[in-house]
Amino acid sequence: MSTFLQQLINGISLGAIYSLIALGYTMVYGVLKLINFAHGDVYMVGAFMGYYLANGLGARGAQAIGMSGEGLVARGLLGSGTMEPSLITALVVMLLAMAICAALGVIIERFAYRPVRKYSRLTALITAIGVSLLLENGGQVVFGADPKFFPELFKKRNIELFGGASINSADIIVLVIAIALMIALQIVVFRTKTGRAMRAVSFNLQSAKLMGINTDRIIMFTFALGSALAAAAGVLVAIRIPRIDPLMGILVGLKAFVAAVLGGIGNIPGAVLGGLLIGITETMVVGYLSPTYKDAVAFAILILILLFRPSGLLGSVAQEKV
Amino acid sequence: MPRYLRNLIIALILLAVLYVLDIVFQGRTISPYFSRILMLSGIAITLAVSLNLINGFTGQFSIGHAGFMAVGAYSSAYFSVSYGANLAATLGNGKLGWLVALGIATLIGALVAGLAGLVVGVPSLRLKGDYLAIVTLGFGQIIVVFLNNIEAVGGARGYSGIPIVKSFFWIFLIAILTIVIVYNIVNSAFGRALISIREDELAAEAMGVNTTRYKVMAFVISSAMAGAGGVLLAHFDGYLNPKSFEFIKSFEILIMIILGGLGSIVGSVLGAILLTVLPEALRGFAEYRMVIYSLLLIILMITRPQGLLGKTAAFKGWRARRKAKSRTAAEEILAEDRRNGVTVDKATLGERQSETSLGEGDDK
């Protein structure tokens, strides 16, 4: 029982992060019908921006970055950071990283995706793969290929729960921030004029244009929003597991995309549901079966869902018209 | 001269040329670096042309090609390690013995990969577009995860000790065979059925094409040929690692055919060679090599989206030209405005009407 509870807690925490990334995939797919393969790498950039910002703000333990595990502990204790680790630090770092990645998302959209938008979707997809490769390889050049260790932004401690399970304070904070961001997104999409325009564009781009919506701006905004969420996910992941490297976005991005398809791509609550499902199943497989199969699980679920309900869990079935 | 006789003569000449080249490459006159890149290009050609059959000609967007390649590579490597070496030894361990052993290994690899293609294709080809892409990608990843867990073939450590048969003759024989097979398929009734599926699946079905059956057949053939490509790779380096068959490899093959032009065999060959040579040519840039490579890819997509030799795109271009001839009055005004530097939103003049008339938004 305690194992189950523990894995459930871990799974929800992991799933919340998948959900945040999946939201970006689903929104971009909604407006452009494009699988934005670079999204997972934007998440990686978010984590690195968080890392540099935390260092810039002088977070404790920052001196030890790049050291080996033991070195980290030894130096981390001796770290003479000027700033006390606190929740405020974490929030500031996260918000700044989100802003930087929003700008990155806009740049990617403007210079890589917009020029190919008029061509076939396949061209756009290959361009997305190109951008993804560019971020991965560029990241290796700019950030260095070795993994880096994220400074501790706030004190972590374990809270004992009933039944022998324990929850880390980092998990709680990750979950709270993730839920807050999802609620914020919900408000933006369903309660603002821009959100209404976004929904209109995803419903039918041509008609939205005819109704006087500046579709280019809306698409740009969608990219900014999705990239900001990915950056938040990047910082949150780094808070949970403080090891970041330029290739960390590949598999996570792929799984988050799977989560988006699972929930029904283009559907915002679906992305959250899909993310949680993938996260929980993955940790359950790690807990009860074998950790080596954890990467296959997401894809196995995906295949089963698509074969029996191709539009995803919450997606609507589109009838083909002649 | 009867056709079969002509074909036979061409085949014999080709074999002779390959054999002579093989001897040339066995000697030390050509640098091993150059011959390595050449042979890797040959393997890439097999993979690219086979992927083009399903992606370019049938229009079914599969991005799990590396998975089938892995199945072919591992199954044939297992055969070669367990039986192939013995077989070659009984045949005298000479060049001929190894060719026979490799031939059997290739058959096994292609068969097992084709079987895997059948298992994956039957359920997933019911899906279309992006969903099919994601399912094939998922299957590809699952194959990699399983290979990581099969201890008999080394698991995550990789599979080493595979007999190395670096044969120019064999690699290019398979590459040429792949090209010939795909060329003949495309120029047959079967191929026309595949192309009709690409152009309009619903219309093809209405014309009596059993679309599911044709799609699965194309998928299985394509997978089998990818498996043969995997066999070549396994016996080229003598070492396999599941990591090298991740989806990034599938993307690489996909980029080859997109770069060359979807639905063009010559394009696939060019794309395969270009993508094998380009990373080597950029080696001088050291760590910036892959950055430049990805930048080039993006720029190429923006400036030449149809690839170097795209047939589909050429067809679309022809259609666009014909459309341009019968421009409506509104479009004439639009063109006039554009010449005068007035920016008018294209969509407002219904330029895309002809595209959407088959889809939603035009309920008469």
Image (cartoon, rainbow, N blue to C red):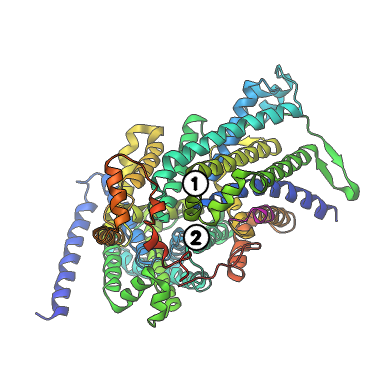
Query: Can you name the residue that lies furthest to the right here?
Result: A162
Where residue B315 sits in the image (x, y, percent)? 28, 62
Which quadrant of the figure contains the N terminus of chain B?
bottom left
Where residue B172 sits in the image (x, y, percent)? 27, 60
Q: Amino acid at mark 1?
A: Thr
Q: Residues within 10 Å of mark 2 (few under 14, many from 20)?
A: many
Image quadrant in which you'd find residue B200: bottom left
Q: Relative to A48, is B312 on the left or the right?
A: left
Q: Relative to B33, is B120 on the left or the right?
A: right
B213 or B236: nearer the viewer? B213
Query: Can you name the residue that lies furthest to the left here?
Result: B1
Main secondary-structure element of the magenta-colored stretch: helix
* Residue A215 tag number: 1
Is residue B87 visible to the viewer in this orientation of the structure?
A: no
Q: Is residue B181 magenta?
A: no
What residue sits 59% from the left and 47% below the top? A24
Where residue A230 sits in the image (x, y, percent)? 60, 41
* Residue B130 tag number: 2
Q: Is residue A272 magenta?
A: yes
Which quadrant of the figure contains the C terminus of chain B?
bottom left
Q: Amino acid at mark 2?
A: Asp
| Segment tinted magenta in the rendering | A266-273
Is residue A185 visible to the viewer in this orientation of the structure?
A: yes
What residue sits 62% from the left and 49% below the top? A23
Whole-number angstrom distance, CA of label 1 to CA of label 2? 23 Å
Chain at numbered mark 1: A
